[in-house]
Each structure stands twice: as C-alpha cells, then as structure tokens.
Image (cartoon, rainbow, N blue to C red):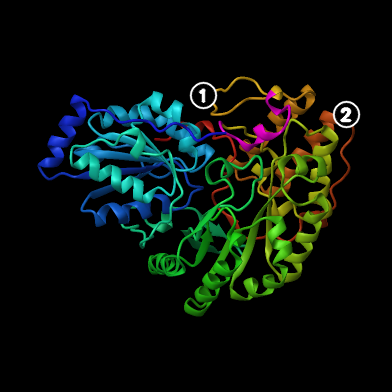
Amino acid sequence: MPNPVPIPLVSSPAFAHATTTAARGRFKVVLINPYELGRQPFALASPTAWLKRDGFEVASIDLSLQKLDADVFAGAVMVGLYVGMHTATRIAVEAIPRIRALAPDARLVVYGLYAPMNAALLAGLGADAIVGGEFEPKLAALARRFRDGGAPDAASTPAIDLGKVDFIVPDRSGLPPLDRYAHLNMPDRSRKTVAFVDASRGCKHYCRHCPVVPVYRGRFRVVPADIVLADIRQQVAAGATHVSFGDPDFLNGPTHALRIVRALGAEFAGLTYDFTAKVQHLIEHAAHLPEFRRIGCLFITSAVESVDDRVLALLDKNHSGRDFDRVTALLRDAGIGFAPTFVAFTPWTTLAGYIDLLQRVIDLGLIESVPAVQLSIRLLVPEGSHLFTLPGFRALLEPFDPRTLGYPWLHSDPRVDALHQSVQQWVENGTADNVPRALIFAGVWKLAHEAAGIPPPAIPPEACGAPIPQMSEPWYCCAEPTSQQLMDF
C-alpha cells in the first residue's frame, strides 16, 4: 500500500500572528505524549534535545500524568503530538479539539508510528503536518520553518522519513520525575524505579498485524550505543534501578544489543533490565540467554500471539505453537522471566482454539507471567495494515471506523464475539480493582468454558508458576483504551 500523501501547510492569519509573536522572542514548541505504557517517553525527550539545540523553548505535557494547561501553550509556534501506539492515537483524537482551542495560533504536527496511517483523519481534525518514521530531524526542520515565517510544501515534507538520524542525548528535564511513572513490582514486594530507553526503531520482519510494518517495511534503525548509555546514565542519576528497552525487537540487531547490555553491566552494578524480542530470535540466540541473565535481565516480553499454527501462519509470525513451549523452557532454564503476549481474538479464532490457548498457559505454568489484558486482545486492523496482503481478508471487514481507528470485523461464530466482550469487561474490571492475575485467569477460564457449553476443569495450583516482576502499568499498546484513559486530559 502506498505511503499516505503528505499534508501541505498553508498560511493563515492565525499563523501570521504566531509568527509575529515568535519574532518578539517567544520561540516555543509544546510536545505532548498521550500514552506510553506508563513510562517516561523517549519520543518527547529526544526531539526536545533537538529543538533546544536550535534555540527553542520546549514545554512537555505527558497526558498520562498531566492535564492540558492553557498557560503552557502561550506563545507556542508549534505543538507536536506523539502517537506511537493505538491507545495513544485514540486519546490524541479525543484531545486534539481541546489542543486546537488552547493553541489556535500554533501549527499542530502529529508524529509517530500511527501518524502516517491515520493522516487523513488527523488532518481533518486540524493537524497541519504528519511526520512518520525517524521524526527528530523533521520536527526540528518544521519548527525552524514556522519560526522563520515559512511553510514547507508537500514535496519537501514527506509523510514518512527513514533516513539515518544522528541522534543526540535525549533531554528529559521537562518531564515529570521517574518516580511518578510506572514502576516494577518485584516478587518480594519491593519496587524498582524504571528507566525507559530506545536502542533501535523499526523491525526487520513483516508480521502482518504489526503496526511497525506499514511504516518501516522491514527496516530498522539503531540508536548508537553511546547515546543509549548516556540516556541510561542520566536516568540512573534520577533514581532508576531498572531499564526497560522499548525497541519493537531488541534482538533485531543482536550485536548492537549485546554491546549495550555488556556496557550496562560493566558500568552499573546491580542495574536490571528487560526487553522485547521475537520467539524466533530467542530461539536463534538462545546461547546468549545465560549472559543476558548474568548481566541483569529479569524478564523478556515476546509476541507469541497464538498457539494455533494456522493463525500464526496467517499472521506471518515465523514460529509455531510448539516454539512457545521451547522458548518457555529456554528462558526458564536461563532463569529469566517470560511475559508472553497474545492476539487472543482473531477472525480465525474458535472457542476451542481460545480454550487451547488458556490450556497451554496452564500446562506451561505461566498464569502469573501473563498480564491479564493479554487474554482479551482483539485483532486491530488499522489503515494501511499489512493484513491486507492476505487474499480475501478485506471481505471479512466492515468499513473503516474513525472512532476506533480501524476496520471492525465480526466473527462468523457470534459466540466468539460474545466471549470477547465478556472477557474484556472481566479483565478491565479485575485490573482496575487490582485483582490477582490467577483469579482473573480463573474467571476467564470459566467464561470460555461457559461459552463452549462445557464444564471448566479445575486449574492445578502449579499452573500459576512462580511470580515474575510486573510493571505497575498493566495496559498494552494494542489494547483498546479504557473510558478513563479517553477522558483523562
């Protein structure tokens, strides 16, 4: 599918006023993050450093912790709104009218992974420019143009830029302190303050349901190790005792990953970390798992998605259902916690298949390792999804729904959709009430068997498995946002 057409920028009286204001010396940019899994956002800190280097005053608003404030927008030439995931984009869509009202004289630039895929919708809401891919240089260039009274034409403002970036150390000084963000809950009930860093962007693979694919199309870009380590260093100085790598796949570049964790281990005694990697990569690089653990890796997140080989083939995951068992054993042997993620409900999921997924979690002793929201994830089909390469897939979908930013679908078996709704509500309520994972799982187990019309077998106590470290922010990038998240700005 071709890239979205870039949105041209035009002059307006409001822009002329903003330019005049800037000419009097108030060259301000406001950067906004709707949601980043409860973590301090690299995607605000990194462009902040670029903009400050160009002489701009930069103010940041993290909507997970802060409210939109009219005083912050005073004198702003540009507002940058980051949409790195589905939940963030849904929140952004709700927030844009308020942002436009608070900053009528500023240009609104929406950037991040989900910006190009939703370009038409965002433009209709008032976005003046869309930036995808490697966003720092483009944001800085736009801000300079706006400051100088110019506006780029469509030809000089591509929607997606995957050029090489000369990264600089992120500036986190304008963000809320780390101890206000999500922390890591340890099995012994202690807590760790978490640093959040990106060591790379994009991905080498083409998993059909992944939102990275329409933008990066099999490419990935590394953040130089010295920049990553400098960013870790400043967050450790701010109190971090654990590092969460935000890369779509930390092992896309295994040499780069090893260089970073070895340097981390050499400099920061006792600092722990986690990362995300494909099942395929964990098997290919299993020989490195003991070293990852020795240096401080507490757990690894991996997108298992399904235990049904047919579904895995349709999603082009490059692993089998039994590879899930193999990775579980490899990580257990290495002493590393395993946090699998799933797309539990797809157009191809059956009631029996969903029960099989739950049964595999039981058989592998992973109940305590699976965040409850993973039991309720429904396949999202955004604009530009690589799923459209599947023959006949479009026939399964309803028209695009701008409210949910995707193409809705109904299962051929209404019982599956009814089960999804029941599971989603059960999980959301249980998570909000801090119900233990084992009890939420037991409820889902019961709901699934009731939907199939069969009695639920007893869950053996050993199925829970040993607790692993858990982030205090329980949501997930591909989960539907809660009603509270959509109102909280």
On the image, numbered disc 2 is attached to which residue? 453
- Residue 460 drawn at (x, y percent): 85, 52
Q: Which amino acid does label 2 sit on?
A: Gly
Judged from the image, the secondary structure of the residue bearing numbered disc 1 is loop
From this view, report whether residue 70 is shown above or below residue 439: above
Residue type beneath disc 1: Pro
**Element under label 2?**
loop
Range of the magenta residues? 383-394
Image quadrant assignment for residue 463: bottom right
Please tell me which residue lies in front, 320 or 68: 320
Which residue sits furthest top? 399
> What residue sits 65% from the left and 75% below the top?
291
Q: Does the magenta stretch include residue 127?
A: no
Q: Where is residue 486 in the image (x, y as percent from the top left)?
A: 47, 32
Q: In which quarter of the image is residue 489?
A: top left
Q: Name the residue under label 1.
A: 402
